[in-house]
Amino acid sequence: MTGKVTPINGEVKNSQEERLYRVMIVDTDPLMRQTLISILSKIEGFSVTHSIGNFSTALELVKREAPDIVLIEISLPWLTGLDIASKIIEIDPNITIYTISTHYYFEFVQFARNLKFAGHILKPVAPALIVEIFQLHKQQYKLKPFPVIAKLWNIVKDQTFEEFYYSMSTLSHHLQEETGRNIFNLNNKLYEIHSILSNTNHGEKICSPFPISDPTLLYIDKVVELCLFYVMNSSFIAHSVKNYDGLTRFFSFIDKNISEDINLDILVKNCYISQGHLSRIFKKYFNVSVMDYIHMRKVTLSKIYFLFTNHTVTEVAEYIGYNERSYFSKIFKKFERQTIQEYKLTKEHPGNKAAIRTSDTKQFISEVFKIDLL
């Protein structure tokens, strides 16, 4: 039994209107996995995203990847894989489970009916039967929204900005995978996310191009993170202001003065709101403290400087309103959970350097975040 998780390569032909059913295969037999991949790759509307040979890996991967369908092996002794399948249903009842085995286990079939597994497939598998099952699947099971969109919507709905901030790297990676690292799909998906989460009119233009036009930059996760931060921050602001208009002046002040040294006394004085009331309201709609939010905004700006310029740490600290380099370094490590030097290694790969230097994404990021990157 191997612990290797194998992503399945190939072009993903999804768009913002329609996407593929994402299928995960969990089977200890590598030949069986390859056979299923071969069959499913020929069925329109389905994409095998992962092929796994280790049951213990499956649960964590399901939590991270949110597949639509899981094909899982059930074998003796005592139906190995059954507990995993049951726990997958507990994680997400919307995931469809198909089980596979070399024998027809009566005990399992009775148990599976109670858990409402979608079906059982006997080995050796017949390609025609697999095709029939999955064609029928499209008729019986409605495809749920993009996993990332659903996750982001829940974050905005639950008003947990901190959760977004600390899962931003994972979410941006998943977003790229869902859109097949395709420029057109990614642009449309980010635009769609912003429109849905901010409840804005699709006719409203955020920025053009939005947000990435250089294909090589799709492989720099940090750039996609910046775009996702912009989208989610805008969405949180839109939701909070809609529910409490008193925050309008606060965000206007932050936007204009984010590069300055900001503290609670300055905010109270300029936003005409008591410190206690501001803290309570902000905690309610963002679930972070006011100062933590401001630090997150400032650290995000610093990451832009580190990614697109050669400014020193001291210079960047001054640009974003921190008077002491040591204090800025401490804040950066607290919120990024890595040192500045570790983050700066992002662009050290020769391909990344070339992509950043030759792309027009630098201009886009500069316009969106309203900072001078010269």
Image: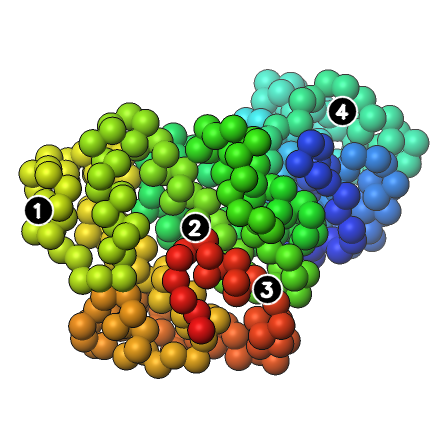
146 or 34: which is nearer to us? 146
Disc 4: CA contacts within 10 A as few (<14), some (14-19) or many (>=20): some
Residue ID at (57%, 36%): 192
Quarter of the figure with the C terminus: bottom left
67 or 150: which is nearer to us? 150
Mark 4 or mark 1: name the one nearer the start of the chain: 4
Q: Which residue is mark 3?
A: 360
Looking at the image, residue 364 sits to the left or right of residue 182; the answer is left
Place of residue 353 in the rendered image (x, y in percent of width and height, measured from the top left): 58, 77
Looking at the image, residue 239 sits to the left or right of residue 168; the answer is left
Residue type beneath disc 2: Phe
From this viewpoint, is residue 32 visible?
no
Mark 3 or mark 2: name the one nearer the start of the chain: 2
Q: Which residue is mark 1?
A: 269
Residue ID at (67%, 45%): 185
Looking at the image, residue 250 sits to the left or right of residue 68; the answer is left
Disc 1: CA contacts within 10 A as few (<14), some (14-19) or many (>=20): few
